[in-house]
Amino acid sequence: MFDHLSLGVRDLAAARAFYDAFFAPLGAAVASASAKELAYGPGGQAGLFYLYPVSGEQVAGLGAHLAFTADSRVAVDEAYRQAIARGATAIRAAGPHPDIAPGYYGCVILDPDGNKLEIVAGAMH
């Protein structure tokens, strides 16, 4: 259903340090980089997730969030750990959350720009 997704960030270099570490456990890496955009994809092979530098008081969209799939609970835990170590704010810690769904294992964080990100082991539904 989606071709690609993008988010605005205040500092592209700082965002790269954050997202490089965040995506590594999920198997994604930089596919292309320039002063105007940064693209990530599976194994760095295709740009599916983009970051663009923006300015202004509000960077993140109110109420919006992106959910990423992890291959395992270990990958969720590691991506969560990397994100928190690089300035993310925890909304929902990595772990089982049966209140969401019986088999749900995941986490929700805010990146340093306030973008809401979720990681789910397997599928949420």
Image (spheres, grey):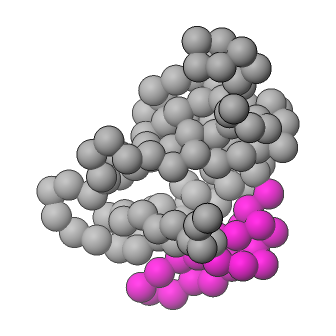
**Res 101 quadrant in image:** top right
Frontmost residue, 13 versus 53: 53
The total number of labels drawn is 0
Residue 116 in the image, given as x and y percentages of width and height: 43, 43
Task: Tell whether 85 sits left or right of 15.
Answer: right
Residue 38 in the image, given as x and y percentages of width and height: 53, 76
Residue visible at 84% across and 36% down? Answer: 72
Residue visible at 63% across and 83% down? Answer: 32
Residue 28 vertical position relative to residue 35 in the rendered view, above or below: above
Residue visible at 47% across and 81% down? Answer: 37
Any magenta on residue 41? yes
Residue 79 in the image, given as x and y percentages of width and height: 68, 41
Residue visible at 22% across and 69% down? Answer: 55
Does the rendering let one see residue 49? Answer: no
- Outermost residue on the left side: it is 57
Task: Tell whether 38 sits left or right of 105.
Answer: left
Residue 1 in the image, given as x and y percentages of width and height: 61, 64
Please give the range of residues in magenta.
Answer: 27-47
Frontmost residue, 16 versus 118: 118
Any magenta on residue 43? yes
Frontmost residue, 120 versus 1: 1
Residue 73 vertical position relative to residue 50 in the rendered view, above or below: above
Where, quadrant-wise, is the C terminus in this rendering? top right
Does the rendering let one see residue 56? Answer: yes
